[in-house]
Image (cartoon, rainbow, N blue to C red):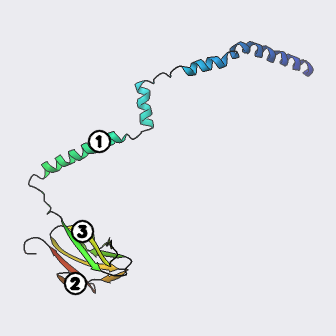
């Protein structure tokens, strides 16, 4: 067979395929629209469960219920583990205050915070900086840091001690003999 005979043969085969496929294409648009108008079938419970596992979605109501249940279990375990009462003394509010007019940043450091700064606030801009820290009864060493400068002698402190070459203030909170 020659090449020039092959071309008409291929054309006839393609034309025959197109003619046979035309009935399948006729009315396709209407069939698609009718299919889309029908409600989608509901997936089985297995398919829904696998989709929920594959793409978890936070349901805040259930998360809150679960958190409350965990908290309740923790409280019950704590009550039964320590029936003799609270082993820690109650915390009290302790006001730390320092007069530092014109200061930009004031903090208190002490053994109660592992010498990490706790920021004080001057809410009304009068130069008196304050913060309240909850502390159980005991003896505490502390100092103020005003704009990066160590201020170890608080006029309201019970006493001062010199530690590592710097003064720190001492405060006694509650308890018998303190």
The secondary element bearing badge 1 is classed as: helix
Sequence-wise first label, 2 or 3: 3
Figure check: 177 above or below 161:
above
Apparent side of residue 13 relative to residue 176 in the rendered image (left or right): right
The spot of residue 150 in percent (x, y) is 32, 82
Measure the alpha-carbon separation of dots 2 and 1.
50 Å
Measure the alpha-carbon separation of dots 2 and 3.
18 Å
Residue located 59% across and 18% down the image = 34
Q: Residues within 10 Å of mark 1 (few under 14, many from 20)?
A: few
Is there CB contact under 8 Å for labels 2 and 1?
no
Apparent side of residue 83 relative to residue 115 in the rendered image (left or right): left
Residue located 24% across and 71% down the image = 112
Q: Quadrant of residue 167?
A: bottom left
Name the disc covering residue 133, or none. Answer: 3
Q: Which residue is mark 2?
A: 155
Q: Residues within 10 Å of mark 3 (few under 14, many from 20)?
A: some
Residue located 36% across and 42% down the image = 60
Figure check: 102 above or below 124:
below
The spot of residue 154 in percent (x, y) is 24, 82
Measure the alpha-carbon separation of dots 3 and 1.
32 Å
The secondary element bearing badge 2 is classed as: loop
Apparent side of residue 102 relative to residue 25 in the rendered image (left or right): left
Sequence-wise first label, 3 or 1: 1
In this rendered view, identify the residue nearer to me: 10 or 69: 69
Sequence-wise first label, 2 or 1: 1
Q: Quadrant of residue 48?
A: top left
Q: How many marks?
A: 3
In this rendered view, identify the residue nearer to me: 154 or 129: 129
Q: Which residue is mark 1?
A: 66
């Amino acid at each position: 067979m020659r090449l020039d005979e092959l071309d008409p043969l291929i054309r006839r085969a393609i034309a025959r395929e197109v003619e046979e496929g035309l009935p399948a294409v006729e009315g396709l648009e209407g069939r698609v629209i009718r299919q889309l108008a029908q409600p989608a079938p509901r997936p089985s419970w297995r398919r829904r469960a696998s989709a929920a596992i594959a793409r978890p979605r936070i349901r805040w109501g259930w998360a809150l219920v679960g958190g409350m249940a965990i908290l309740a279990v923790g409280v019950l375990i704590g009550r039964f583990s320590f029936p003799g009462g609270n082993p820690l003394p109650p915390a009290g509010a302790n006001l730390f205050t320092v007069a530092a007019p014109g200061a930009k940043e004031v903090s208190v450091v002490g053994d109660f915070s592992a010498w990490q700064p706790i920021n004080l606030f001057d809410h009304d801009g009068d130069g008196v900086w304050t913060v309240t820290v909850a502390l159980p009864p005991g003896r505490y060493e502390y100092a103020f840091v005003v704009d990066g400068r160590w201020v170890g002698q608080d006029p309201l402190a019970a006493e001062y001690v010199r530690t590592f070459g710097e003064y720190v203030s001492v405060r006694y909170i509650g308890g018998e003999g303190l």
